[in-house]
């Protein structure tokens, strides 16, 4: 569905309210009243078999007796008659029906919901809902909801998966004086989906910021693809409800067991450039800021305050969020030197001191706004009773009017009733103003994050031996196995172009000795059997084998141990591999997420990986730029940069390994789980010591 197709849902020329009620307090009455009060300028036709008049409008006994055309019908009759009502609307050639009625698939009444869509489609009508609160659209303008009547038009689109929360959000946006381009819930999405709505909003010429409330996402990858199509200057803030680990399932890899769905959401949102807010409060603050402010031209932020205390609080918050404070004393002196009283300070935070009023702020702000090297401003005010508040408010308004679309200015005012009132008024003008300094800084940080450079990267062509990988996988599938043997997994790693220490499979002692000599001591010996999972625990792995005698004794010991502890295991031989020196042990993995598909993991590896859980995720495929961010995100990153006099490790090799594994995941979708553990990283290079791969056998 294209945005043009939804035009008359958001800008209906005439509307009907089927189930318009005569009784105040009923949903069918409130919707009527809200439509009329919102200044909707098309015709409004109430439909109710009782006839009469509602809110001064003639009531039609059924939709077919309306003479004119109707673009949108609100359906507000009980579920038992809603399907019929929808069919009648469809016959009347209504373009869209918003079915507010609940009692369909959400309570298991799936057939009626399907029937409703079928009847609508037969006549080309589309359905929003059922089980929604209606729709507010500034482009009409129309408030066809049963929420609060006061909705301010603006440039924020609220799209909610939850109806109840959506209604609450209308109230909250009114309280916050926030201007909306639309507010809509998708309810049971029997027909129109959030993707349809978002595609429309991307191109509606009003919306600047989308506030998305997500409860669950069946197809996260679809959302990521969709978000790629948004205009660059449109920003998305999302709240994802429920941080629980859903969709947990039995997996054979560390990567799989470490991948809680919430971590994947975090990663996916980051990659898609969606800002994820932890709370509704943050979400509201951020969207207000994103809607009001332009992209900052650089990282130099200046705090202008009349109180040292809140200035320090703001500076601390900047440090916490990583917001960069300008510290070029020359520029600060040049800008503020002659506006600061003698006892003030032009060091950032710039302290105008307690007696500063509207004019002082004006002078300081204007200078800062005209200084090229200052890129964003946090203006703080602490109520002092030394100066009247009115001129201050006027200054802030004037600054916003003159400079607001050139440079971000965020306000925080602290005091009593008087300052609270100013904050509300500023918000009403679309100016980002907050009670709390921390909220101001967190919002400025969100603005920086939202404008982070998300340039696309071309994929490199790599020397991956696809036919060799294909052969290995076919062989495993042919055997009816879903798990590759360690040696098979390593063969895939070699074919991917990774550095795997030399290894070979041997089936007798003589071959073992020859191979060990060929590879060169010291070597590692490991049993090969799909039936033995914990090889080390039963004595199936021996390290540091240094000579022929140790190879012979080792081979015999491994076979003896396996026969004793796993008498029924199919032993395919013993792997002899080059023993390599210690380095930093990391893990690289792939898992398959039910909503996002293939997901990559990187973290601190070794035997404690599941205890330490120092891992990060991204949805595959991942660009090299994103991988380098990913690598830096682990807590123990300093192990790679070199701690306690140790040398810096080859981080580029790690990035290359993850990149190659991402491409493997993309080219071989049948690989459902993969762990390289450990990937040992050295000053130069990184080696794959062990790999585990599971495949999904197509039936
Ligand atoms: N066409 C038009 N109007 C009809 C009708 C028909 N065929 N048959 C009955 N009506 C009228 C009724 O006479 C009544 O008008 P009145 O109040 O003037 O008498 C009106 O439609 C509503 O019908 P009623 O039986 O009184 O239902 P209701 O108002 O109690 O409930 C719903 C209707 C849709 C609100 C209710 O079924 C429902 O689904 N509520 C939940 C809504 C919800 O929460 N949605 C999700 C939000 S996120």
Image: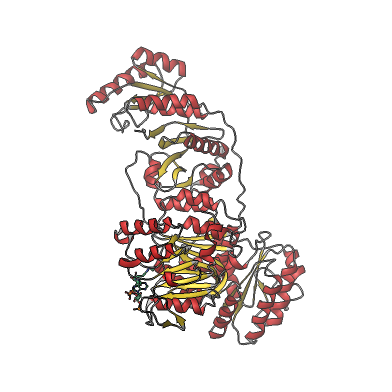
Res 578 visible: no
The residue under the point 33% across, 14% down is: 508
Say whether residue 128 is visible: yes
Q: Which of 411 and 650 is in front in this view?
A: 411
Give the quadrant of residue 587: top left
Q: Nearer the viewer, residue 681 or 102?
A: 102
Q: x, y (%) of residue 331?
A: 75, 65
162, above or below 1, in the image: below
Q: Where residue 598 appears, x then y in whole percent?
A: 45, 42
Above or below for 264 versus 504: below
Residue at figure coordinates x 38%, y 41% from the top left: 254
Residue 47: percent from left, percent from top: 41, 74
State ligand 1's quadrant: bottom left
Q: Where residue 608 sits: x, y (%)?
A: 38, 42
- In this rendering, the answer to whether 177 lies above or below 576 is below
- The residue positioned 34% from the left and 27% from the top of the image is 541
Please state if 438 lies on the left or on the right of 596 as rendered: right
Q: In this view, does 187 lie to the left or right of 354?
A: left
């Amino acid at each position: 569905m294209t945005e043009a197709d939804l035009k008359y849902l958001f800008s209906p020329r005439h509307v009907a309210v089927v189930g318009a009620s005569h009784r105040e307090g009923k949903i069918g009455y409130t919707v009527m009243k809200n439509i009329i009060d919102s200044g909707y300028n098309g015709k409004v036709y109430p439909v109710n078999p009782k006839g009469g008049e509602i809110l001064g409008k003639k009531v039609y006994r059924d939709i077919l007796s309306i003479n004119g055309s109707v673009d949108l019908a609100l359906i507000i009759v009980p579920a038992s008659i809603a399907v019929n009502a929808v069919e009648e609307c469809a016959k009347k050639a209504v373009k869209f029906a918003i079915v507010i009625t609940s009692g369909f698939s959400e309570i298991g009444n799936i057939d009626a919901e399907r029937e409703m869509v079928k009847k609508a489609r037969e006549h080309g009508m589309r359905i929003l809902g059922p089980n929604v609160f209606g729709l507010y659209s500034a482009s009409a303008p129309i408030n066809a909801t049963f929420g609060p009547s006061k909705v301010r038009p603006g440039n924020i689109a609220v799209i909610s998966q939850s109806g109840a929360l959506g209604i609450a959000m209308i109230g909250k946006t009114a309280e916050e004086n926030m201007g909306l381009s639309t507010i809509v819930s998708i309810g049971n999405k029997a027909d129109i989906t959030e993707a349809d709505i978002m595609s429309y909003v991307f191109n509606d010429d009003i919306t600047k910021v989308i506030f998305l409330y997500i409860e669950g996402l069946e197809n996260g990858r679809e959302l990521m693809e969709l978000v790629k199509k948004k205009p660059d200057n449109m920003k998305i803030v999302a709240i994802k409800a429920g941080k629980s680990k859903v969709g947990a399932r039995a997996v054979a890899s560390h990567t799989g067991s470490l991948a809680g769905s919430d971590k994947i959401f975090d990663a996916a949102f980051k990659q898609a450039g969606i800002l994820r807010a932890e709370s509704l409060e943050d979400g509201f603050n951020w969207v207000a800021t994103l809607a009001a402010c332009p992209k900052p031209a650089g990282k130099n932020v200046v705090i202008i305050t009349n109180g040292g205390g809140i200035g320090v609080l703001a500076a601390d918050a900047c440090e916490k969020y990583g917001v960069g404070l300008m510290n070029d004393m020359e520029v600060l002196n040049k800008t503020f030197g002659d506006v600061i009283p003698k006892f003030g300070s032009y060091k950032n935070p710039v302290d105008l001191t307690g007696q500063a009023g509207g004019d002082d702020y004006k002078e300081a702000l204007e200078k800062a706004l005209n200084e090229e090297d200052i890129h964003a401003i946090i203006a703080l005010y602490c109520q002092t009773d030394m100066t009247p508040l009115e001129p201050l408010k006027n200054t802030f308004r004037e600054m916003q009017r003159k400079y607001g679309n050139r440079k971000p200015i965020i306000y925080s005012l602290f005091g009593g009733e008087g300052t609270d009132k100013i904050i509300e008024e500023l918000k009403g003008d679309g100016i980002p103003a907050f009670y709390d300094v921390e909220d101001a800084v967190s919002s400025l940080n969100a603005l920086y994050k939202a404008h982070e450079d998300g340039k696309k990267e071309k994929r490199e062509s790599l020397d991956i031996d696809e036919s060799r990988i294909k052969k290995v996988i076919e062989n495993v599938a042919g055997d009816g196995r879903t798990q590759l043997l360690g040696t098979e997994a390593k063969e895939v790693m070699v074919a991917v172009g990774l550095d795997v220490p030399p290894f070979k499979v041997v089936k007798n002692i003589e071959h073992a000795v020859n191979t060990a000599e060929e590879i060169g001591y010291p070597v590692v010996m490991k049993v090969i059997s799909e039936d033995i999972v914990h090889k080390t625990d039963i004595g199936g792995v021996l390290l540091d084998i240094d000579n022929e005698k140790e190879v012979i004794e080792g081979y015999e010991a491994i076979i003896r141990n396996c026969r004793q502890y796993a008498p029924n295991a199919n032993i395919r031989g013993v792997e002899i591999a080059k023993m390599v020196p210690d380095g930093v042990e990391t893990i690289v993995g792939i898992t398959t997420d039910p909503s996002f598909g293939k997901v990559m993991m990187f973290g601190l590896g070794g035997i404690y990986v599941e205890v330490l859980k120092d891992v990060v995720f991204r949805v595959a495929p991942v660009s090299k730029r994103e991988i380098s961010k990913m690598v830096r995100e682990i807590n123990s990153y300093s192990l790679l940069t070199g701690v306690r006099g140790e040398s810096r490790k080859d981080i580029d090799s790690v990035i290359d390994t993850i990149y190659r594994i991402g491409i493997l995941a993309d080219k071989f979708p049948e690989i459902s789980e993969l762990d390289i553990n450990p990937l040992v990283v050295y000053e130069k290079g990184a080696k794959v010591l062990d790999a585990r791969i599971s495949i999904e056998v197509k039936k």
